[in-house]
Amino acid sequence: YLTGGFSVSINCFFLFLIIFKSPSSITPYKVLLGNSAITDLVFSMSTTFLQCRLIPHKWAFAYIALGPAKYFGEQVSYYTYVLQLHSLFYKFLCFPLSFGFRYYILIRPVPTMKQLMLLLFCIWLLPLAQSLCFINSQSNSIAIREYLAENKPEYNLTGW
């Protein structure tokens, strides 16, 4: 909880600085900075809430929620896991944007905030589609528990 709480508070502070304290000369770049801060904030909140434990076995991975999400049931844990993967995938897609933005403004006029937001929205559609597909691919948790009990008996999963 310590690193998650630290990450959430730092990203909130970062958002405050971007919105209220950044100079007007970097206004278009604020869109990319804010996008990065919001994505990191969502990822850190979902990671802290879920605290996922992966159990690998042959062709599959099973995950167990060890954080507060486990008290809200399997569906909340699964949707939090989907949100975590969604924000991670989106973060990976947006990572090169700041480098590309700096190169782009050297050779072309600075894009407007509206153009940058449209670009970010178009990039976001890919992780959204991935998340929607992933939501519909949830496996039966009883079958997973039985599989793990048979193949990974060293894990005591009676409390999950």
Image (cartoon, helix red, strand yellow):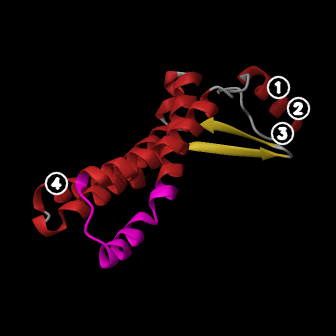
Task: Please say if the residues under marks 1 and 4 sit with CB atoms less than 8 Å apart.
Answer: no
Residues at marks 3 and 1, CA–CA distance in whole angstroms: 10 Å
The residue where tag 2 is placed is 150
Q: Quadrant of residue 37 in the image?
A: bottom left
Q: Is residue 118 above or below residue 24?
A: above
- The amino acid on which the numbered mark 2 sits, given as a three-letter code, is Glu
Residues at marks 4 and 3, CA–CA distance in whole angstroms: 49 Å
Instruction: Estimate how packed mark 1 is, as few (under 14), some (14 to 19) or many (20 or more) residues with alpha carbons within 10 Å.
Output: few
Q: If you read the primary sequence from the N terminus, does the residue marked by circle 1 or circle 4 appear first? A: 4
Query: Depth-wise, is mark 4 or mark 3 nearer the camera?
Result: 4
Residues at marks 2 and 1, CA–CA distance in whole angstroms: 6 Å
Residues at marks 3 and 2, CA–CA distance in whole angstroms: 6 Å
Task: Please say if the residues under marks 4 and 2 sit with CB atoms less than 8 Å apart.
Answer: no
The residue where tag 3 is placed is 152
The residue where tag 1 is placed is 146
Please indicate whether residue 112 sits to the left or right of residue 148 in the image: left
Which residues fall within the magenta stretch? 91-113
Q: If you read the primary sequence from the N terminus, does the residue marked by circle 4 or circle 2 appear first? A: 4
- The amino acid on which the numbered mark 1 sits, given as a three-letter code, is Glu
Residue at 16%, 54% (x, y): give it: 19
Task: Give percent across and percent down for residue 151.
Answer: 88, 37
The residue where tag 4 is placed is 19
Q: In which quarter of the image is the C terminus?
A: top right
